[in-house]
Amino acid sequence: MRAQATTYLRQALDQPNVDFRDGQWEAIDGLLNRRRLLVVQRTGWGKSMVYFLATRLLRDQGAGVTLLISPLLSLMRNQIEAARRIGVRAETINSTNTEDWDEIEDRLQNDQIDILLISPERLANDNFRANVLAHVADRVGLFVVDEAHCISDWGHDFRPDYRRIVRVLQAFPSNIPVLATTATANDRVVADVLSQLGEGIQLVRGPLVRESLKLQNIVLPSPAARMAWLARTLPALPGSGIIYTLTVRDAERVSAWLKKNDISAEAYHADVKDVEGEDPRREVLEQDLLQNEVKVLVSTVALGMGFDKPDLGFVIHFQRPGSVVHYYQQVGRAGRAVEEAYGILLHGEEDERITDYFIRNAFPPQQHVEAILEALGQTDGGLSVPQLKAVLNLSHGQIEKALKFLSVESPAPVTKIGSKWNVTAVAETYRINEGYVDSITAIRHQEQAQMTEYMEHRGCLMEFLARALDDPAASPCGRCAGCVEAPLLSPEYNLDLANQAAIFLKRSYQPLKPRKQWPSGGALPIHKFSGRITADLCAEEGRALCLWRDAGWGQMVAAGKYEQNHFDDSLVTACVEMLREWTPDPAPTWLTCIPSLNHPDLVPDFARRLAECLCLPFRPCLSKTMDNPQQKHMNNSFQQARNLDGAFGVDVDQLMSDPCLLVDDMTDSGWTFTVAAALLRQAGCPVVHPLALTLNSPRMD
């Protein structure tokens, strides 16, 4: 059997002389003998090859379909291609291929699929459970849980939908072989996963030290300094690689900076959209990196688990991740099939603030849960998420997070029927287990502190990571900056480049896309705005000078708004420069501004000074007609729009029937600009160009 498996391995990898890595065949053999295994092996060891080869061999013996649950379906394209080279027919059911579902279900019924890949979220779908899972449950030949640390409450990447996996597994016959795999689980997580998967699970654990990886830590507090260091260092690094950032914002601006310095770079994150009629954008970017057609992808965690490029030459972190586990998992993308690769951790002044944000927002607060359960309890037929947004001042994300959390509780206080959520009998007495939340939060802060220790560690960095992951074989690597007692790459950066980066950050103008649709459900009954925002009421695309409290102008805007109650003249000059680059068309011939009762003089004073510099008239034609709550306290589109219904009046005597520049200090959702622009246009202004000093973007994904 091993000889046949070796033949399949060489065929899959298209390498005629390759052989199994330590432990791979033993894991496959265990599955052929119907064992249940938890395999903890370093990134790049080849866990996917274990389940694809086991599937091929089990199918040769007449076994049924393999069911693989993984959060990485979009990043498994190259692994699936390897499986197809050995005749393994792999298919996936996910939200991007709905048109193929019927055909795939028919092929499953006819035993024409060898391995079905699904996301854990698919298990929450009633139709999938009834039409697919129920029909294959008694014919599953192998059950695989990829990235099994997600099962554990204590794991760094716990996902509520993974709780359903344990329930599915309990429904299968006990003689079905099971494989759970992960590269990032310490003893606490391993013990939790083993206990959840049930009795008879055998642990297979290998060493985590990566012999080809050369690690180094560099402290460069300011983003401009780190950007200068990247611009000078990247061209000299081998091959291509990944730069990880903690936020989408930084992925975009770091990639733009590198392009400006003639380095081939692209941003990669969850918000990178596919273009209709072309290859999916993220898939194109992955292929560009795989084929070394781009020097670097600047990515969030979206390009983390599952991406496999054996010859990746370097992984650089622009900011410090929140845990050693996160860092090991990401830096382990590099150096899988090359003799040396670099793993460089940069540390900046914003790291702690960003990771604190993630920790604070990991769980839905009790008040959100209570509000949702109360709203659902007052209806007979339940409420959809859009309907909940109309009755609750919670964001879409806050509602979705709370509902997902509640739906996987056992017993669950909510259930979904069609598109609507309903309460169950346990809703009246349900409360979040605060002790549980506090314990998880405490662990996250401990992990954060451990990353600080790693950053300051003067010994072997690879050994530190391995020990933090409870690797019994942890030992000095002899290759990192700690072992050689000298920098592997110079930590110095060019001051001129840093100054250029600082100017670049200040000129990080943000586009303000006009909204095209009024919120459904009648959010603006006074103005009678509903449906599509028609062309005669729509604003033009605007601009924001900077991001709130960001490096560059963001800190100065914050100080002017909340400390000085006056915006500095340098911000006026900066907006004039932005307008020269922006060149709104048709050009505005006058200015007006968004009024405020809380700060009545702040924005008008700025708008007047801007108008003087532009040699344009300022007309205060908008007035505030009621003392409504501040927009920053409104958390979803319905509430944001409803809060503005009837809030503004237009003085037609002050209005000019020419294109105008509509000025405000801060924008977030864009609804203030949207409503004000519609009123101005309704009153006779033909074109409205929004201009904000800062864009407040609280999301950090």
Image (cartoon, grey):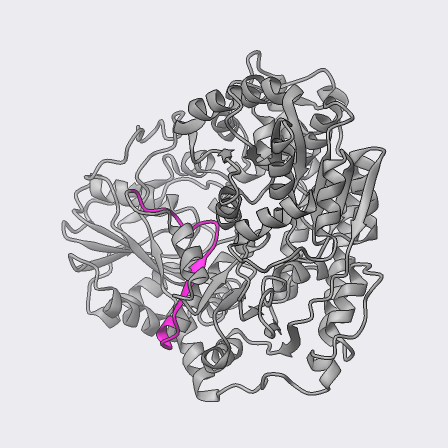
Say if residue 265 shows up in the picture. yes
- Out of 437 and 301, give the one closest to the viewer: 301
Residue 35 lies in quadrant: top right
Residue 395 visible at all: no
Up/down of 240 relative to 395, above or below: below
**In which quarter of the view is residue 601 placed?**
bottom left
Total numbered labels: 0
Left or right of 170, for residue 369: left
Picture coordinates of residue 349, whole percent (x, y): 61, 71
266 within the magenta span = yes
Up/down of 6 relative to 222, above or below: above
Residue 541 percent coordinates (x, y): 28, 52
Location of the N terminus (image quadrant): top right
Give the x, y percent position of residue 578. 30, 68
Which x, y percent locates residue 302? Answer: 53, 52
Q: Does the magenta stretch include residue 568?
A: no
Over which residues does the magenta segment extend?
Answer: 259-276
- Horizontal side of 201 relative to 234 (left or right) equals right
In this rendered view, identify the residue nearer to me: 534 or 92.
92
* Whether residue 458 is situated above or below residue 393 in the rendered picture: below
Q: Is residue 339 above or below residue 698?
A: below
Q: Which of 688 and 590 is in front in this view?
A: 688
Residue found at x 26% / y 50% = 621
The main secondary structure of the magenta stretch is loop
